[in-house]
Image (cartoon, rainbow, N blue to C red):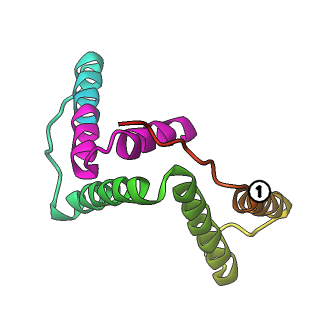
Amino acid sequence: SGLASSLCQFSLQGQNRHAMTFSMELAVYSACSIVLTSVLKGRSLSFSGWSLLTILPVLTQALGGLLIGQLTKRAGGIRKGFAVCAGVIITAVTEDVTGLGTRLGLRHGIGLALLLVSLQMYNASEPVKHKQKAP
């Protein structure tokens, strides 16, 4: 996940690629992978049994992928990772308080402590200054 995020950030920021084009390319590669895997395993690619509600998770995942591409281009992979961790923390605490999910335990507290330490280390470090390339 970290390597993929770094490569995506390099492509989007370092090579100044358009985020929507990059997301569409990833979608095409994913679709080709699904088709190839299905053919090799002898599975059917039919959509029989699908309804309008079945397509809803597919569309929300697609929209999420486009938004993640924009986020990675604008904020970078590390900030995106911290945002994901914050979302997981909010979800876990909400589920614990409402009693609808897993009760938080010691390992959750250790994970939170490690996240906070890494966030502090990231924020305390000096940004790397890049030399300007000569024209």
Q: Nearer the viewer, residue 120 or 84?
A: 120
* Position in image of residue 106 (x %, y %): 86, 62
Q: Secondary structure at mark 1?
A: helix
Q: Name the side, left or right, on which 121 lies relative to 31.
A: right
The residue located at (61%, 61%) in the rendering is 85
Q: Residues within 10 Å of mark 1 (few under 14, many from 20)?
A: few
Magenta segment: 1-29
Question: What secondary structure is the magenta-colored segment mainly?
Answer: helix
Decide: is 13 above or below 124: above
Q: Mark 1 — residue?
A: 121
Decide: is 100 above or below 82: below
The picture quadrant where one finds residue 60 is: bottom left
Which quarter of the rendered picture does the C terminus lie within? top left
Q: Nearer the viewer, residue 97 or 133?
A: 133
Decide: is 37 above or below 128: above
Q: Amino acid at mark 1?
A: Met
Which quarter of the rendered picture does the N terminus lie within? top right
* Position in image of residue 116 (x %, y %): 76, 63
* Position in image of residue 92 (x %, y %): 65, 70
* Position in image of residue 39 (x %, y %): 22, 20
Q: Is residue 19 magenta?
A: yes
The residue located at (69%, 76%) in the rendering is 96
Q: Name the side, left or right, on which 105 lies relative to 69.
A: right
Q: Name the side, left or right, on which 24 lies relative to 105.
A: left
Q: Name the side, left or right, on which 3 lies relative to 26.
A: right
Q: Nearer the viewer, residue 21 or 54?
A: 21
Q: Nearer the viewer, residue 3 or 107?
A: 3
The residue located at (23%, 38%) in the rendering is 25
